[in-house]
Image: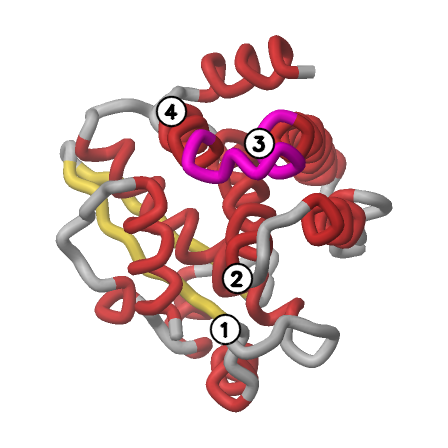
Amino acid sequence: MLGRVQRGLETLYRIDTGVAVDDFVIDEPTRDNFVADRKPREQLLVVEDGGEMSLALFVCPAAIANLERHDPNHRLGDHNLGDFLLAVEGVSHFIYAIMCARAERPVTQLELELQAEVDKYVTCLLVGDPDTRASTRWRDRLFVEPCYDADLDAEERERYRAANDNAHRYATWLEAMFVGPRRIPEMLAELRRFYRHGLAGKLAQIARAA
């Protein structure tokens, strides 16, 4: 399932990491050996040493099992949406971290979270028929009154809120400019440009769009 999400995102953005996310997935006991504080259902672990970056990805096995039983390509609903978003977020972080490392470009946690929020909206939109009604439904579901984990500290909560707010503004603009007029190829081109911006470029694009 994670491999399918990876192939979808890499195809969308016309990139090739050359690695398989499944080879970097760790189980819960292994994750717990490295993490002493928060242990969410999805977590990208990054270690940099001597200019070399090591990655590992944890995604709750129960979430993956649920997606195997309820394929999101067939239908996204209450029975599998939360787990699908979890998988997209983890794979999004994984791909983006690799692409930034290869470009020798530093990346912030806010940048990772912002791109993941955009990826979740676009992925949900493209699973079905990308029309205005679907876009509005997904924007409302993903960005309006989001729920954050109760154990987030103030800095983490503010980072997630900033990522959510900016992704919502960008998705609203995409809907008006591309989804409503049915200009989907142009939207994909815009998304590919956005993906290759750093955080400052992403925020500038959102500010211009809004």
Q: Nearer the viewer, mark 3 or mark 4?
A: 3
Q: Is residue 42 above or below residue 1?
A: above
- Spatial CA distance of label 3 from label 4 is 15 Å
Quarter of the figure with residue 4: bottom left
Residue type of the residue flagged with mark 4: Arg
Residue type of the residue flagged with mark 2: Val
Picture disc at residue 101: none
Q: Which residue is the site of mark 2? A: 127
Picture disc at residue 178: 3
Secondary structure at numbered mark 1: loop
Q: Is residue 6 left or right of residue 64?
A: left
- Spatial CA distance of label 2 from label 4 is 21 Å
Mark 2 and mark 1 residues within 8 Å of each other at the beta carbon: yes
Earlier sequence position, callout 1 versus callout 3? 1
Residue type of the residue flagged with mark 1: Asn
Residue type of the residue flagged with mark 3: Phe
Magenta stretch: residue 185 in it? Answer: yes
Secondary structure at numbered mark 3: helix
Q: Which residues are magenta?
A: 177-186
